[in-house]
Image (cartoon, grey):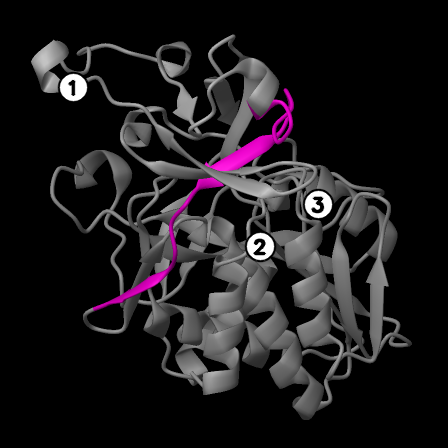
């Protein structure tokens, strides 16, 4: 991966983007993409679009969501402690003893999730969000309300780090890696001059309501769409592979198989992988995918979809872990697949 691209990935992963508060990361995405896109667009929900070949009659939408899970402040007590609930599918269990950032209207402030000392009985065996609180050092409700309001969002204070064997770890790789990948695909396609129009979208709200995907597909009205997301790696201790499948880091991007997935699109992706000697893995999505693909598919007259995912360890934790090689392979796979398309592509599975 080139240094410029790696720096952009680090920029995205260091920028707070809890679902519903994606404005800052979207501005960074636009700043990067506008140097090679023919056209930049936004919409009323906060999606960011980079387009090449916008006049082409055949349109492809590739979507990676930029929002991350987090917390929402739901009560401030008289002593100035902040109580919170979840924003998206975040677990309360890793929160004990963690540092967080509260994204206030005026400024961002740091807090810690309090931990009962072992000398005082320690942490209860069973606890939930209502048992936790954030300590920002305030001495009263009046003091902390100068910085924080009920409804403000918070994230773990955790930066991306490099691990051995070209792997990275941090919070929110789900799915700011996807927003990165669609930007890089657009960048490479801008040099290949594809016949089709390509609409790369950094979508919002996937972790909470899939609203960004609906707005994107409604606006673009593509001939087909690819959702670019993450999926559960199962190559670490304690995972039941008989139940959850065998998905490994460094073994390539993951294609979904199931009723929502368009057969011909998956065949094009598989053919591209064979031609470019890219390993692919598979996951099963019999009914729904749980990603932007579901909402894009049911937009307008209906949109054929496929899902290409990055293997990810420790999903929805502060230490999500992925492989830079898998990211590179996924960029190449999607780029080469789209570059080979023609404007008279027949997607009807019955023809």
Q: Residues within 10 Å of mark 3 (few under 14, many from 20)?
A: many
Q: For mark 2, what is the residue?
A: 306
Percent x, y of residue 18: 57, 41
Q: Residues within 10 Å of mark 2 (few under 14, many from 20)?
A: many
Query: Measured along the vertical axis of the image, is residue 173 above or below residue 49?
Result: above
The residue depicted at 53 percent of the width and 43 percent of the height is 68
Mark on residue 232? Answer: none
Q: Residues within 10 Å of mark 1 (few under 14, many from 20)?
A: few
Left or right placement of residue 66 versus residue 7 in this view: right
| SS type, badge 3 | helix
Comes first in the chain, label 3 or label 1: 1
The residue depicted at 55 percent of the width and 56 percent of the height is 15
Left or right placement of residue 222 versus residue 12 in this view: right
The one nearer the camera, 300 or 263, is: 300
Does residue 56 appear in the picture of this structure?
A: yes
The secondary structure making up most of the magenta span is: loop
Left or right placement of residue 309 versus residue 19 in this view: left
Does residue 69 appear in the picture of this structure?
A: no
Q: For mark 3, what is the residue?
A: 213
The one nearer the camera, 340 or 199, is: 199
Contact check, label 2 and label 3, Cβ < 8 Å = no
Q: Which residues are magenta?
A: 144-163
Of the two numbered discs 3 and 1 in the rendering, the one whose residue sits closer to the viewer? 1
| SS type, badge 1 | loop
Q: Work out which quarter of the rendered image holds the N terminus and state it.
A: bottom left
| CA–CA distance in space, label 3 to label 1 | 44 Å
Left or right placement of residue 249 versus residue 205 in this view: left
The residue depicted at 19 percent of the width and 51 percent of the height is 235
Q: For mark 1, what is the residue?
A: 117
């Amino acid at each position: 991966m080139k240094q410029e691209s790696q720096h952009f990935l680090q920029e995205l992963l260091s920028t707070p983007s809890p679902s519903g508060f994606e404005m800052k990361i979207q501005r960074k995405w636009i700043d990067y993409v506008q140097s090679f896109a023919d056209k930049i667009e936004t919409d009323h929900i906060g999606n960011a679009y980079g387009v090449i070949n916008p006049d082409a009659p055949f349109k492809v939408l590739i979507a990676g969501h930029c929002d991350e899970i987090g917390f929402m402040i739901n009560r401030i007590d008289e002593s100035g402690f902040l109580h919170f609930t979840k924003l998206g599918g975040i677990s309360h269990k890793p929160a004990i003893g963690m540092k967080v950032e509260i994204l206030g209207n005026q400024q961002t402030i740091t807090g810690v999730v309090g931990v009962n000392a072992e000398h005082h009985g320690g942490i209860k065996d069973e606890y939930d969000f209502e048992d936790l609180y954030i300590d920002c050092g305030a001495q009263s409700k009046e003091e902390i309300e100068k910085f924080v309001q009920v409804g403000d969002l918070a994230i773990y204070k955790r930066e991306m780090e490099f691990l051995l064997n070209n792997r990275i770890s941090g919070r929110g790789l789900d799915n700011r890696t996807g927003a990165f990948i669609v930007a890089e695909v657009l960048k490479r396609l801008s040099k290949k001059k594809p016949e089709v129009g390509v609409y790369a979208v950094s979508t919002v709200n996937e972790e909470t309501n899939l609203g960004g995907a609906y707005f994107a597909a409604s606006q673009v009205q593509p001939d087909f769409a690819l959702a670019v997301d993450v999926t559960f790696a199962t190559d670490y201790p304690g995972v039941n592979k008989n139940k959850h499948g065998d998905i490994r880091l460094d073994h390539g991007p993951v294609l979904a198989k199931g009723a929502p997935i368009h057969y011909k699109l998956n065949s094009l992706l598989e053919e591209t992988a064979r031609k470019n000697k890219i390993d692919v893995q598979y996951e099963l999505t019999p009914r729904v995918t749980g990603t932007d693909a579901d909402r894009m598919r049911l937009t307008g007259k209906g949109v054929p979809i496929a899902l290409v995912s990055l293997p990810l360890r420790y999903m929805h934790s502060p230490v999500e872990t992925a492989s830079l090689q898998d990211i590179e392979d996924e960029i190449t796979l999607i780029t080469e697949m789209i570059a080979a398309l023609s404007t008279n592509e027949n997607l009807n599975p019955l023809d």
